[in-house]
Structure formats: structure tokens, C-alpha cells
């Protein structure tokens, strides 16, 4: 190992880089990237299909319509079964008629051995996501996708069919583009509009508001300011939230019951609050949907947004309390490049503060699960349901955060759950046909592995136990 200032280089830098910015080394990656670890990460940003999925999966609108149809058919089935049961009771016929009546329809909906359609949609999206992570050459871009998806999170508990499509449509195409474009895509996506209740919002003086005697929902406006752009204590007021909520009225969706375009975005002028609005001291004249676009464009370029994004990015990859100098470099890059997220990623990689030998980040459950699958090759035989259950058991169920601020990536949130990872590690290890644990230790950790960790793996009683202990070593748990 060599050290330039406080930053590592050589094989140790390569091993750290692959854990810190990706999903861990496989094959001979430590040796292959040792000469230029930063260059290897930068090359990951330049792949033509970086961040995109080639899987043949339905659009968010298609998924929303399919879920609506499924739920409507299930409701009809339940009503029909109840009706038949009442008829049977009136006629004094045998019990169980309702079960008999609904069985053929149940099989038609999801097949005799398949989960219900909404769960199938989520499972298919999850498999594509995990395949992308575990099969990635390095995985830096995939980690960026995961970061931004959590930053702009929605919940499948509220809108099950759209969770995966939302990530593919609003997040993935923009993770190496401009933040302003990412912001516009996210805030206008039907999944976000439904998740944060903007589909229910209407201006008090709008045509619909007057006719229905309904008004604003401020959730989308508040979370856009507090979580997505400026951050807390950044100077905005409740009046700004209300004005912004008025601006966003009319940003809604076509009800999924509409068979052709249901689940798609629409600007409905009948819901839109007419008139100018003032936000953060700037007056935005009435312009329909363009009024909202103008506000988002300014929020994307606000200095507070640059600081907030810089802090979040540095905290995610480098340390729970990142070096102030690194945050300052990232904020400057964000401002100087007009929110160019590829340049921001390059600044993160180029900063010496990102290459300190201290490995201060505990891998979140999701990153650890992906890293363990990737190293052992268990994803080839592990059903996606097992993988999703593992992540949920550890407290980070895929696309199901408890609140709009997403899952925490700080150590305090996950340290108490470390013991639970051992059972999951053992379950994954049991699906690996043949692997030399000591060879995998060199592949994954190399110069990072301590003598104690090497001895722990070497002294394991079985290959399965050795593999499980390998992914539970302190060096593997941290990035």
C-alpha cells in the first residue's frame, strides 16, 4: 500500500473503491484496477447504457391499469362469491359453494401456482434491479441509481405497481444528466403525484375546487422543498409551501380505470389555482403547467439545493459525518456545472477526501445483500422472493420506506440489526454449489482482510459456515 497525503493507492485503494462505490470486487478486479482505481470508476460512468435496464417490463401506466383491472376483477369475484353463498343458503344447499365458484376465476387471474399480479409486477422489477447490481462490472452507476431512488423515494405500500417503473422512468435516465431534468421527471411522475397526494389537490379558486368545495394538499410541495431540493432550515416558510402547493395544482394523473392512458400524467387546468404566486421572494406569473416547471427549475439551481445534495451524497458514500471540505467541493461542482450529475460523480471520485483509508460507512442492508449475492454467486439460484424477504427482515424492504425521507444510510440506523445478517448469510451460502471461501476472501477483501478475519474463515467447520462468516467480517460489512 502507498499513501498520497491521507489517501490510499494501489491494491488497497482498489479494494476500498470497489466496496465504497460499488458492490464489492469479483474475479480479479482488485488486481485489474489497482493501477488506476479512480479511472476504473470514471469508466463506469462512460458506459453507453450506464444505469439503464434492458428488461422487457411494463410502463408505469401499463402497470397501474393492470393492477386496477386485477383489483376490480377480484372485487367482482368476492361479490359474486358472496351472492352465490347467499343463494345457496336460501336454497339450503351445501356449504362451500362460494369456494367452488371462485376457484376458476382465481386461477385465471394469477395462475394456480403464481402470486397475485401486483406481487408479480414488483418481483419482476426487483429481479431486474438485483440482476443489474450483481452483474455490473463495478456498480458505481447502479449505486447512484439506488441513492437517487431513495432520495426521491415513493412506497410500493401505497402504489404497488408503479414502484419499479417509477425508478426506471424517472430516476435511471437522469442519474448522469442534469439535476433539473431529474427533478422535473420525478415531481411530474404519476407515482410521485399519487404517493404525495397531489392527485387530490386542487386550487380553492379553481373550477374543480369551487364545484367540489375542496382545496389544497401541501404534501408534494413540502417534501419537494424539505427533502428533494433545499433541505430543512434553508429559509423557506410555510407561505412558500402554500404558494408552491398552489402552483402544483393540476399536476395529476389519468385515473387507472381509463383503459388506454390510465395511470399517465396529465395537467388538468380545471384543478389549477389561477393567478401569480410568490415563492422564496420571486413572483411567478400564471402560466399553467409552465408555472410549476419554472419553480422547479429555480429550485434545482438554488445554492441551498447544491449544499443539501452535496451533504447527502457525501454522507451516503463516504461518512455519516463527511469531511466539510468534500461537501464544499461537491456543492461547488453542482453550482459550477449547472447541476450536472455526471460531473458531480466525477468530483466525488476525484476528491482525496473520498479515498481515506478509514472505512466509516456500514453497508445498508440492501447494499450488503447485493454484495453478498454478487460475491458468492447465490443470485443465480436464490429466488427473488428470498432476496426480498432477506432485505425486509433486515429492516429495509425494497421500495417500502416508512416515510418520504426514505431509508437512513447512517450506522445508527442499522448497527443493531447486524446479528440478524448471519442467518441470511447462511441461507445464501447454502445455495452456492462450489466455492473456495479462502479464495473468495482474497477476491473480495485482499489487502483489507485482517489476520483475525482470515483465521475466522479458515477455521470454519464447513464451507457454508465459512462463506457466511466471510460476508460477516468487519471488512466486508463496511465500505
Image: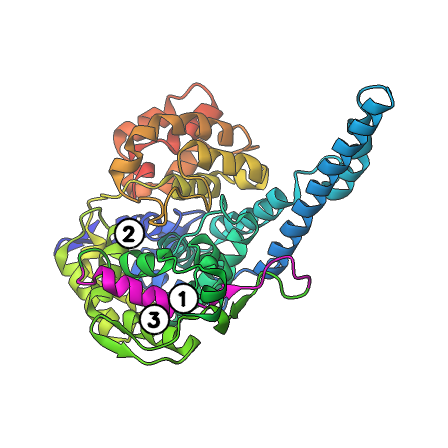
Please report contact status of discs 2 and 1: CB closer than 8 Å, yes or no.
no
Q: Residue 203, which numbered label? A: 1
Mark sitting earlier along the chain (3/2): 3
Which residue is painted at 19% across and 44% down in the image? Answer: 358
Please report contact status of discs 3 and 1: CB closer than 8 Å, yes or no.
no
Mark sitting earlier along the chain (3/1): 1
Q: Residues within 10 Å of mark 3 (few under 14, many from 20)?
A: many
For this rendering, which residue is in front, 385 or 363? 385
- Please tell me whether mark 3 sits on a helix, a strand or a loop: helix
Residue 136 x/y as whole percent = 47, 54
For this rendering, which residue is in front, 263 or 26? 263
Q: Nearer the viewer, mark 3 or mark 1?
A: 1
Q: Quadrant of the C terminus?
A: top left
Q: Nearer the viewer, mark 3 or mark 2?
A: 3
Mark sitting earlier along the chain (2/1): 1
Which residue is painted at 44% across and 51% down in the image? Answer: 154
Residue 20 x/y as whole percent = 31, 49
Q: Which residue is mark 2?
A: 317
Q: Quadrant of residue 299?
A: bottom left
Left or right: 55, with 395 as reference point: right
Q: Which residue is mark 3?
A: 296
Which residue is painted at 24% across and 58% down in the image? Answer: 231
Q: Residues within 10 Å of mark 1 (few under 14, many from 20)?
A: many
What distance separates the C-alpha of mark 3 from that of mark 1? 19 Å
Q: Which residues are magenta?
A: 234-259
What distance separates the C-alpha of mark 2 from that of mark 1? 41 Å
Please check the rendered image and state whether residue 422 is part of the magenta-colored stretch, yes or no: no
Left or right: 201, with 38 as reference point: right
- Please tell me whether mark 2 sits on a helix, a strand or a loop: helix
Amino acid at each position: 500500500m502507498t499513501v498520497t497525503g491521507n489517501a490510499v493507492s494501489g491494491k488497497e485503494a482498489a479494494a476500498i473503491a470497489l466496496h465504497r462505490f460499488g458492490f464489492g470486487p469479483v474475479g480479479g478486479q482488485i488486481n485489474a484496477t489497482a493501477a488506476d482505481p479512480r479511472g476504473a470508476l470514471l469508466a463506469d460512468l462512460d458506459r453507453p447504457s450506464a444505469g439503464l435496464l434492458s428488461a422487457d417490463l411494463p410502463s408505469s401506466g401499463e402497470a397501474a391499469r393492470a393492477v386496477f383491472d386485477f383489483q376490480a376483477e377480484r372485487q367482482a369475484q368476492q361479490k359474486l362469491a358472496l351472492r352465490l353463498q347467499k343463494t345457496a343458503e336460501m336454497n339450503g344447499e351445501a356449504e362451500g359453494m362460494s369456494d367452488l365458484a371462485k376457484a376458476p376465476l382465481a386461477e385465471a387471474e394469477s395462475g394456480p401456482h403464481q402470486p397475485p399480479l401486483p406481487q408479480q409486477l414488483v418481483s419482476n422489477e426487483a429481479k431486474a434491479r438485483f440482476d443489474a447490481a450483481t452483474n455490473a462490472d463495478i456498480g458505481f452507476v447502479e449505486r447512484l441509481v439506488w441513492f437517487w431512488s431513495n432520495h426521491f423515494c415513493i412506497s410500493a405500500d401505497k402504489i404497488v405497481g408503479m414502484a419499479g417503473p417509477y425508478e426506471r422512468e424517472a430516476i435511471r435516465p437522469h442519474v448522469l444528466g442534469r439535476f433539473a431534468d431529474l427533478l422535473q421527471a420525478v415531481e411530474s411522475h404519476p407515482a410521485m403525484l399519487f404517493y404525495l397526494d397531489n392527485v387530490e389537490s386542487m386550487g380553492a379558486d379553481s373550477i374543480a375546487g369551487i364545484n367540489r368545495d375542496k382545496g389544497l394538499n401541501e404534501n408534494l410541495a413540502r417534501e419537494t422543498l424539505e427533502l428533494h431540493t433545499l433541505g430543512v432550515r434553508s429559509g423557506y416558510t410555510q407561505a412558500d409551501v402554500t404558494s408552491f402547493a398552489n402552483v402544483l395544482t393540476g399536476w395529476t394523473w389519468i385515473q387507472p380505470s381509463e383503459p388506454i392512458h390510465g395511470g399517465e400524467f396529465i395537467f388538468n387546468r380545471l384543478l389549477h389555482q389561477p393567478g401569480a404566486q410568490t415563492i422564496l421572494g420571486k413572483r411567478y406569473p400564471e402560466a399553467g403547467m409552465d408555472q410549476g416547471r419554472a419553480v422547479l427549475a429555480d429550485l434545482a439551481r438554488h445554492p441551498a439545493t447544491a449544499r443539501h445534495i452535496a451533504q447527502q451524497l457525501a454522507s451516503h458514500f463516504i461518512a455519516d459525518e463527511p469531511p466539510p471540505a468534500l461537501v464544499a467541493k461537491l456543492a461547488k461542482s453542482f453550482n459550477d456545472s449547472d447541476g450536472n450529475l455526471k460531473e458531480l460523480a466525477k468530483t466525488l471520485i476525484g476528491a482525496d477526501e473520498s479515498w481515506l483509508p478509514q472505512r466509516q460507512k456500514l453497508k445498508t442492508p440492501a447494499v450488503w445483500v447485493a454484495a453478498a449475492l454478487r460475491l458468492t454467486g447465490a443470485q443465480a439460484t436464490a429466488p427473488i422472493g428470498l432476496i426480498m424477504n432477506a432485505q425486509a427482515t433486515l429492516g429495509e424492504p425494497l421500495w417500502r420506506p416508512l416515510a418520504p425521507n426514505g431509508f437512513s444510510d447512517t450506522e445508527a440506523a442499522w448497527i443493531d440489526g447486524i446479528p440478524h445478517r448471519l442467518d441470511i448469510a447462511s441461507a445464501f451460502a447454502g445455495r452456492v454449489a462450489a466455492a473456495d471461501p479462502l479464495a473468495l476472501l482474497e477476491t473480495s477483501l485482499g489487502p483489507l482482510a485482517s489476520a483475525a478475519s482470515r483465521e475466522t474463515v479458515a477455521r470454519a467447520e464447513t464451507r457454508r459456515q465459512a462463506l457466511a462468516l466471510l460476508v460477516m467480517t468487519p471488512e466486508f460489512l463496511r465500505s
